[in-house]
Amino acid sequence: MIGTGYLGATHAACLAAAGHDVVAHDVDPTRLEALSAGRAPFHEPGLADLLQEGVGSGRLRFTTDVADVADAEVHFLCVGTPQQRGGRGADLGALRTAAAAVARHARRDCLVVGRSTVPVGTADDLLGVLEAEAQVSVSLAWNPEFLREGRAVQDSLHPDRLVLGVRDDASYAVLAEVYARWLSEGTPVVRTDLRTAELAKVSANVMLAARISVVNVLGEVCERSGADIDDLVRILGADPRIGTDVLQPGLGYGGSCLPKDTRAFVARAGELGVESAALLHHVDLVNMRQRARAVDIVRELWGERRRVAVLGVAFKPGSDDVRDSPALDVATTLQRLGADVRVHDPRAAGSAARVADRLSYADSAEEACADADVVTVLTAWEDYIGLDPVALRGAVASPVVVDARTCLDADKWRAAGWSFHGLGRSACAS
Ligand SMILES: NC(=O)C1=CN([C@@H]2O[C@H](COP(=O)(O)OP(=O)(O)OC[C@H]3O[C@@H](n4cnc5c(N)ncnc54)[C@H](O)[C@@H]3O)[C@@H](O)[C@H]2O)C=CC1
Ligand SMILES: O=C(O)[C@H]1O[C@H](OP(=O)(O)OP(=O)(O)OC[C@H]2O[C@@H](n3ccc(=O)[nH]c3=O)[C@H](O)[C@@H]2O)[C@H](O)[C@@H](O)[C@@H]1O
């Protein structure tokens, strides 16, 4: 396993649990130290148990030295593919470096399997890298991963489908052996070519991103027309062709994948001359506009003292990840605009403090809200959905709440005397 982030660490632990002998390499010694001790370096339910089991059994080892993977039969490339600095396409530098290192060190014929999310056509480029570096015969396959953070282990152990992009039967046979446990459990498998496998992953992410932006456009229409977004979402979700998942309006999508993958898709489609991909550029614009709209709503309400409580900075509930978090983006923007911001998050405060150390962090939601002029809910944690608006009213300076995730019960908060505002909700709705 090359790269031990959310993708690589989870995949390594799950393959070890399936009985394979796994050696995982990363260039980050701190991350490897935690993993070797059976500690998950990020909040991912079930991962620490699998790591301890794998390390304890001797089937799972971690190494800073890429030469230690030289004897592997299969190499999974799981390194990051972030947005380019100063560009919108994917930065494939780490992937090329990792592929070259594996090929250079491989001492036996082997299969290299791309797992990272990449623009279609990347494998062609990597084949050139492998051929230039390897002294042995190296084949390439593509096997994208669809796990969600916060559910990484569950999603990996029970995926909706396995996508095996291969160039020949021999590569397919190797992957079928790697995934024998999943195949025996009936996981649907799609065998395809490398380009389709690459494209499958970004396509899934742009579909999800588009869905979120569509529901956010509908939310803005609700705000302006006085229609009810909660009822609208219920009505839409009842149609099985639409379904209820990924239909939560609000601050929009963030994280390390949907934003950068949408942009990389548009960039690659542009290179391919697909002008209609501009549709997905608008998905990105709508998404980013939600953050600006949330800031505008708070500025209208913050009064002279501008004391703002921010509840939630994780990019989504159930995660301690703040990479491209819409909530953290809004919190830091409000502070930059002169607000006195007090933040609470049940899990992500530590990771937020590492990248946004000028914000002030509270130990509880109540402490963050004490004496606030505006309370904002920016991540839909259960803790905030369960807050008692009657009790909280006594702690704030003004009972004004902005529900940027459309997660609170508006009637309950209004009945408790709060002035209730939010993305997707008309200010005058009763
Ligand atoms: N985070 C997620 O939920 C999912 C991510 N993906 C994709 O998987 C890829 C990895 O994502 P994450 O695990 O979130 O990233 P991450 O940033 O958490 O982890 C990437 C790891 O690769 C290591 N690395 C970088 N260059 C290296 C090299 N040359 N050799 C060895 N290790 C190296 C880094 O030190 C880091 O530990 C990305 O392409 C992402 O789009 C796919 C499915 C889910
Ligand atoms: O490529 C990846 O790394 C992964 O990206 C997403 O997974 P993830 O980033 O963990 O998060 P999601 O649960 O999809 O949420 C993404 C963002 O959309 C937001 N969201 C989600 C659902 C919704 O209804 N509304 C909404 O605004 C969340 O708050 C979050 O900021 C995909 O769901 C995974 O299938 C994919 O493997």
Image (cartoon, helix red, strand yellow):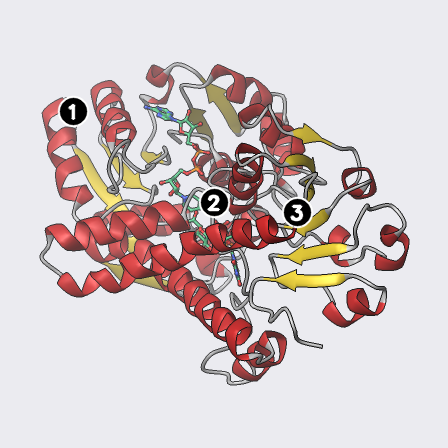
Q: What quarter of the picture does the N terminus occupy?
A: top left
Residue indicated by mark 3:
302
Find numbered disc 3 in the image and state the secondary structure of the residue it sits on: loop
Kindly check if marks 1 and 2 are in contact, taking CB atoms under 8 A apart as contact. no
Q: What quarter of the picture does the C terminus occupy?
A: bottom right
What's the distance in space between the residues labelled 2 and 3, CA to CA? 28 Å
Find numbered disc 1 in the image and state the secondary structure of the residue it sits on: loop
Name the image quarter holding residue 192: bottom left
Indicate which label's residue lies in the foreground, 1 or 3.
3
- Residue 292 place in picture, x, y as percent: 47, 50
- Residue 210 place in picture, x, y as percent: 38, 64
Q: Which mark is residue 255?
A: 2
Kindly check if marks 1 and 3 are in contact, taking CB atoms under 8 A apart as contact. no
Indicate which label's residue lies in the foreground, 2 or 3.
3
Residue appearing at x 71%, y 49% in the figure: 375
**In this orientation, which residue lies closer to the viewer: 244 or 48?**
244
The three-letter amino acid code for the residue at tag 2 is Gly
Q: Is residue 120 visible?
A: no
Q: Residue furthest front?
A: 304
Ligand 1 is found in which quarter of the picture?
Answer: top left
Residue appearing at x 57%, y 24% in the figure: 354
The reply to whether the residue tagged 2 has its Cβ within 8 angstroms of ligand 2 is: yes
Determine crowd level at label 2: few under 14, some 14-19, many 20+ residues with C-alpha closer than 10 A.
some
- Residue 412 place in picture, x, y as percent: 81, 68
Q: Which mark is residue 210?
A: none
Q: Which mark is residue 134?
A: 1
The three-letter amino acid code for the residue at tag 3 is Trp
